Amino acid sequence: MKRKRRYRKKRKIKYGRILMALILILGLVFAFLHLPIFNIKKISVSGNSKVESSTILAASNLTTEDNFIFIDIEDIEKRISGITFIDSAKIKRSLPLNIIIEVIERKPASTIQISNKYLLIDKYGIIIGESETLMLNLLLIKGIENVDNIKLGDKIFDFATEEQNKLLSEIYDGESLLKGESLLKFKNINLEENKAELVLYNDVFVAFGSYNNVEYKLKVLDQMIMSIEEDTSRKASMILMEEGPDPVLVYE
């Protein structure tokens, strides 16, 4: 009985020593990896044409005094993506001890006229630039009146009425089939007080009607657009969304 107790005691001491040795080794490794020899040597930025590299580096808060191994990549990407004109950011490690910051800048998807200039809006409804001329490849938004104080970085939704935003929020960042790059399916959107009128990329006029059931109307409209694209034997001229119980597609 005493021998068994001594054996158990020796075994506990043995395992305790092994555990302490492992902890000591891990501590030494951890301390070694934090030595200055593992600091970042070079930080480069790619993918930017409008946003200065210095602005991106400042947002990243990275320096050559930071450790190459233990930087918080997720947090850095989040900070860089917080720059108004940056859509997304990705941080990559590159040996030996180099950090590459890859960014995707926001691109214009639509425009709105203010006085003698045009503001450029990305697919999320954020004002990202301005132009002195109308860019014909972009969706032109009309009917938003309270835009005197609008500036870069603002969201177009903050200047539209509650009714207008029922349509705008779905087109720009809703769950409908027309969100994002599909803004290119439209040429013009005229937002009146109680109704909207649209012109498709192929010059088909859409009497959208009221701002009721916007999500449903956009899904139906997307199906009708696909039908027009598939039927090349005749030319569509007009879509009436509220003419009767169902939307009506009019051909020439």
Image (spheres, grey):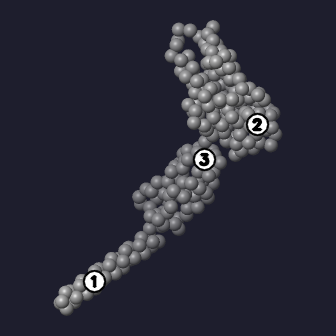
Asked which secondary structure carries label 2, the reply is: loop
Q: Position of residue 36 (x, y in %)?
A: 47, 71
Q: Residue at x 69, y 34 (%)?
A: 166
Asked which secondary structure carries label 1, the reply is: helix
Q: Residue 219's image quarter?
A: top right
Q: Nearer the viewer, residue 177 or 70?
A: 177
Q: Quadrant of the C terminus?
A: top right
Residue 7 as seen in the image, left or right of residue 92: left
Cα distance, mark 1 to mark 2? Answer: 74 Å
Q: Is residue 13 above or below residue 51?
A: below
Q: Is residue 199 above or below residue 76?
A: above
The kind of residue on which mark 3 rests is: Ile
Q: Is residue 182 above or below residue 84?
A: above
Q: Residue at x 63, y 54 (%)?
A: 55
Cα distance, mark 1 to mark 3? Answer: 57 Å
Q: Residue at x 36, y 77 (%)?
A: 23
- Which class describes the residues within 10 Å of circle 1: few (<14), some (14-19), or many (20+)? few
Name the residue beneath numbered marker 2: 161
Tell me if residue 135 can be seen. Answer: no
